[in-house]
Image (cartoon, grey):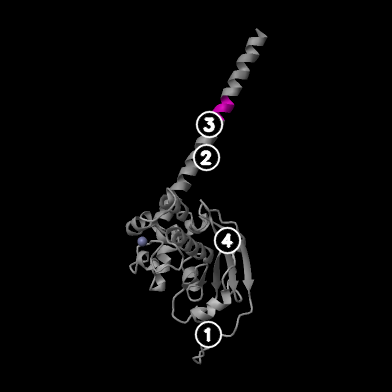
Amino acid sequence: MEKVRIKLLFLGHPRHEIDKKKLLGLKSKYFEVVGIESKEKLPEAKKNDGFLDVEYSVKEVSSMVGSPKNNDITFAIMNYRYDDGFYLHRLNPNAVCLSISGVDQLLLNNSISLENFIIKNIYEVVALSFALDSVCSEEAYNIVHVDTRGCLFDMNGDKFDIIYNTESPCICNECKSFINGKNIPEGFVSGLEKELKKIRKPLLSRVETFIKKYPLFSIGLTLFSSFLISVLASLFVEYLKLNVKFTELLTSILVCASNS
Ligand SMILES: [Zn+2]
């Protein structure tokens, strides 16, 4: 099985720091990140509606990203909006572009990293390139669904829904049967599901989220843990005392025995 080769391309000046090392080091059975490039100076957006925010059309982004000469897939990431409000567009069979403008604050407010959002979308593109003849195939519309199921293929028409399917997205039964009907490697769906579960917050963030979600339980658990630690500490001290007495007793017996 050949892995999909992904080349990351950052467009424009990043508004947030992104851990590129993490993205470059991604490990997957199905894809590899072969390089990261940046294009900081972008042409001026044609849309001029009097507002100061920058919005690009799909056509403009296509010409900025271009098409790789080999079979790699260019996965571009830009800090500007699309003029149609979507955040991910397939530009040609070998290039897609993800806009993180507008969704960045939504993710950060929900303690979801931009890196995880990028990784989730890389998986979506990789899954499409395995299941379909081309990333650009019209068949993609048969798998993406408008209702939000926490699935890798949720459309997220309402951008707020990305908070439900960025971390550990599932593959819903309908999508599973669609993919399994295609010419895919053996165990593809279960392998993909296993890797998707790894898209999650770091441990400290998960603990923080748990405490925020269950404050009373967390307080109870802290009190119980403190109680348990103090009981164990007392038992340990008693054990040490007994041990000292036992050693003293043993020494006395040995002294008596040697004197007699
Ligand atoms: Zn689905």
The disc, 1 or 4, on the residue closer to the chain's N-terminal end is: 4
| Residue 82 x, y percent position in the rendering | 48, 79
Q: Nearer the viewer, residue 225 or 82?
A: 82
Q: Which SS does the magenta portion mostly show?
A: helix
The amino acid sitting under disc 2 is: Ala
Residue 176 sits above or below residue 256 on the image: below
Residue at mark 2 to residue at mark 3: CA–CA distance: 10 Å
The response on whether ligand 1 sits within 8 Å of label 2 is no
The amino acid sitting under disc 1 is: Asp
Residue at mark 1 to residue at mark 4: CA–CA distance: 28 Å
Question: What residue is disc 1 on?
Answer: 53
Q: Say which residue appears at 49% left-offset and 43% top-offset.
A: 230
Residue numbers of the magenta segment: 241-245
Question: What residue is disc 4 on?
Answer: 23
| Residue 117 x, y percent position in the rendering | 49, 65
Q: Say which residue appears at 58% left-offset and 77% top-offset.
A: 64
Splitting the image into 4 quarters, where does residue 79 fall? bottom right
| Residue 184 x, y percent position in the rendering | 43, 53
Q: Nearer the viewer, mark 3 or mark 4?
A: 4
Q: Nearer the viewer, residue 132 or 258?
A: 132
Q: Residues within 10 Å of mark 2 (few under 14, many from 20)?
A: few
The disc, 4 or 2, on the residue closer to the chain's N-terminal end is: 4
Give the label on residue 233, or none: 2
Quarter holding the C terminus? Answer: top right
The disc, 3 or 1, on the residue closer to the chain's N-terminal end is: 1
Residue at mark 4 to residue at mark 2: CA–CA distance: 45 Å
Image check: 133 left or right of 237? left
Give the label on residue 73, or none: none
